[in-house]
């Protein structure tokens, strides 16, 4: 190998080589850090500006319901998960007393209306005779009804006393003492304590009940007494409901050596007693209703007779008209009282909560039932303040649900834009509600929804990639490549942007201009 010293001694070879090396070094030095460039031609086309947000589905309607009046719950008709229609009854209170009062008020209204009509017509002798006959017949009907109620009340005591002493006492030690003790095995100590206490209270109640029954006067008005005696029947029936719980759980393995036949007899005895008490309550309700109807009929007949006798003077007609108006108001009040004893659904939907329990006392305005709309869902999304001014009520949107995948696209429209901000991580956002135009089935509350809203669209717009734009001194700048391959920086004005990274240029360049982009080392 020749040494470098020998090589440089040949000037013919060395000098051109050196020149080439120097020129190459100068080129590399001057072009060090120079960037390769890529250009794009400004072209016209269509551009849409879209706002994309994420939200959650929720029922368009949801309600929590409570009774307007307090009372004992008599029926629960719709458990959780039930589909309900608008106006359908969900639960009912015991409105027996209010219903009877309503019937009496309706009868009074009908009577007063009839009396007003007769008064306006004027009285005739034959009308007086007929009216007098009506009064006499109404008195007889009332007397008969009171006698029937008298018999019913006495019979109800007998049924209750028979149920307790002949059917229940066989299960107690010292049943009529101050310390009765149920002699059936049970693991429910609270239930055992309850029946013992109830049996003690019932014995005292039976004694006072007998005194009250013996004091009844046949043919007299007994409506006031009947309610107290009805409460006595309910007390005894409640006692037998608890006894049924004790007896019905007994088995041959419960202890005590019970045979199947013995257990069947026990259960039959309790069932028979409960049947007696239910019959007694039904009979008493019917008898009381008959008395009230008879009282209303008598009152009506007497008022008709009085009006006929008084004649059709204007003052009497005015009084009769006032009485009718008062009756109408009373009927309306009682109709409302009966009506609010039924809890009804205000919407079509599904029951999501049902806390009403038969036998419990419902409080006023205590929420018991919740319902959400079944087929009517909406979407709520929080939109940043930078985009909220671009949205308007009735704007259309395209929605995809994660549960259905991105290929299933549904239409929606903006129904509400909240005027007040909501801070999320200290960033102001605004809640926007969308309603489905073509709602998918089935939708559940809480599904993730991806929403796109086209807020603007321009045709024949000049378009360039957003990455070709730089910011200098608060100006939008692009680098234009001329025909001579020389570049110059041009200030532009921009319009719409889309999610694909394209920007509309409204001023500064023209179609066909070449713009430099994607400058890389």
Image (spheres, rainbow, N blue to C red):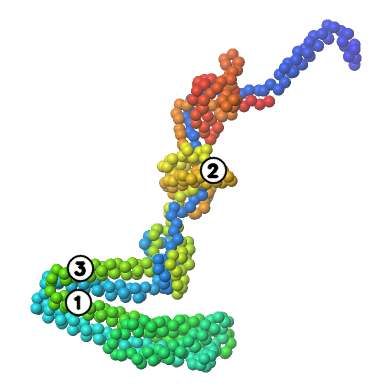
User: Label 2's element?
Assistant: strand
Up-down: is 402 above or below 144? above
Please identify the residue farthest to the left as the structure is shown: 125
Which residue is located at x 51 percent, y 90 percent?
Answer: 171
Q: Is residue 94 left or right of residue 184?
A: left
Give the percent coordinates (x, y) of residue 511: 50, 21
Q: Label 3 belongs to which residue?
A: 321
User: Label 1's element?
Assistant: helix
Which residue is located at x 67 percent, y 23 percent?
Answer: 35
Q: Earlier in the sequence, mark 2 or mark 3?
A: 3
Would you say the residues marked 2 and 3 are in contact, meaning their CB atoms lie under 8 Å apart? no
Whether residue 450 is visible, yes or no, is no
Judge by depth and name the residue closer to the eye, 153 or 274.
153
Which residue is located at x 51 percent, y 27 percent?
Answer: 494
Q: In what quadrant of the picture does the C terminus appear?
A: top right
Would you say the residues marked 2 and 1 are in contact, meaning their CB atoms lie under 8 Å apart? no
Classify mark 3: residues with Cα within 10 Å, few (<14), some (14-19) or many (20+).
some
For residue 428, the mark is 2
Q: Label 1 belongs to which residue?
A: 303
Judge by depth and name the residue closer to the eye, 167 or 295.
295
Whether residue 448 is visible, yes or no, is yes
Q: Give the foreground label among 2 and 1.
A: 1
Q: Quadrant of residue 122?
A: bottom left
Up-down: is 270 above or below 16? below
**Structural distance between the alpha carbons of marks 2 and 1:** 73 Å
Judge by depth and name the residue closer to the eye, 136 or 511.
136
């Amino acid at each position: 190998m020749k040494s470098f010293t020998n090589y440089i001694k040949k000037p013919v070879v060395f000098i051109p080589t050196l020149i080439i090396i120097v020129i190459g070094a100068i080129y590399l030095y001057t072009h060090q850090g120079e960037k390769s460039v890529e250009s794009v031609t400004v072209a016209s086309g269509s551009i849409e500006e879209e706002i994309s947000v994420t939200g959650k589905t929720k029922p368009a309607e949801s309600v929590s319901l409570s009774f307007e009046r307090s009372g004992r719950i008599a029926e629960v008709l719709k458990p959780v998960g039930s589909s309900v229609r608008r106006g359908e009854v969900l639960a009912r209170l015991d409105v027996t007393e209010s219903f009877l009062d309503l019937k009496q008020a309706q009868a009074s209204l009908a009577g007063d209306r009839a009396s007003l009509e007769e008064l306006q017509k004027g009285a005739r002798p034959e009308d007086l005779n007929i009216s007098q006959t009506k009064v006499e017949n109404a008195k007889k009907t009332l007397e008969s009804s009171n006698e029937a109620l008298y018999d019913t009340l006495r019979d109800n005591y007998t049924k209750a006393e028979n149920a307790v002493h002949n059917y229940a006492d066989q299960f107690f030690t010292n049943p009529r003492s101050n310390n009765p003790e149920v002699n059936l095995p049970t693991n429910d100590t609270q239930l055992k304590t309850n029946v013992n206490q109830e049996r003690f209270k019932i014995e005292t109640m039976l004694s006072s009940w007998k005194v009250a029954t013996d004091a009844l006067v046949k043919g007299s008005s007994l409506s006031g007494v009947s309610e107290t005696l009805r409460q006595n029947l309910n007390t005894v029936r409640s006692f037998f409901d608890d006894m049924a719980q004790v007896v019905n759980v007994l088995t041959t393995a419960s202890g005590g050596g019970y045979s199947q036949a013995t257990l069947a007899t026990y259960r039959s005895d309790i069932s028979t007693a409960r049947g007696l008490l239910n019959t007694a309550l039904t009979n008493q309700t019917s008898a009381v209703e008959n008395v009230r109807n008879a009282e209303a009929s008598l009152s009506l007949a007497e008022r008709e007779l009085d009006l006929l006798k008084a004649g059709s003077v204007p003052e009497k007609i005015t009084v009769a008209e006032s009485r009718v108006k008062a009756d109408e108001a009373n009927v309306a009040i009682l109709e409302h009282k009966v009506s609010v004893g039924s809890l009804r659904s205000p919407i079509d939907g599904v029951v999501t909560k049902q806390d009403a329990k038969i036998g419990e006392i419902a409080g006023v305005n205590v929420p018991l039932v919740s319902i959400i709309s079944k087929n009517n869902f909406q979407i709520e999304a929080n939109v940043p303040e930078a985009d909220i001014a671009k949205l308007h009520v009735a704007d259309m949107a395209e929605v995809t649900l994660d549960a259905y995948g991105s290929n299933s696209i549904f239409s929606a429209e903006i129904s509400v834009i909240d005027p007040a901000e909501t801070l999320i991580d200290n960033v102001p956002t605004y809640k926007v509600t969308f309603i489905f135009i073509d709602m998918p089935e089935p939708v559940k509350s809480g599904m993730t929804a991806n929403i796109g809203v086209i807020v603007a669209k321009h045709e024949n717009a000049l378009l360039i990639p957003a990455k070709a734009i730089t910011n200098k001194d608060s100006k939008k700048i692009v680098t234009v490549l001329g025909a001579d391959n020389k570049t110059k920086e041009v200030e532009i004005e921009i319009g719409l942007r889309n999610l694909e990274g394209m920007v509309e240029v409204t001023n500064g360049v023209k179609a066909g201009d070449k713009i430099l982009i994607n400058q890389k080392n």
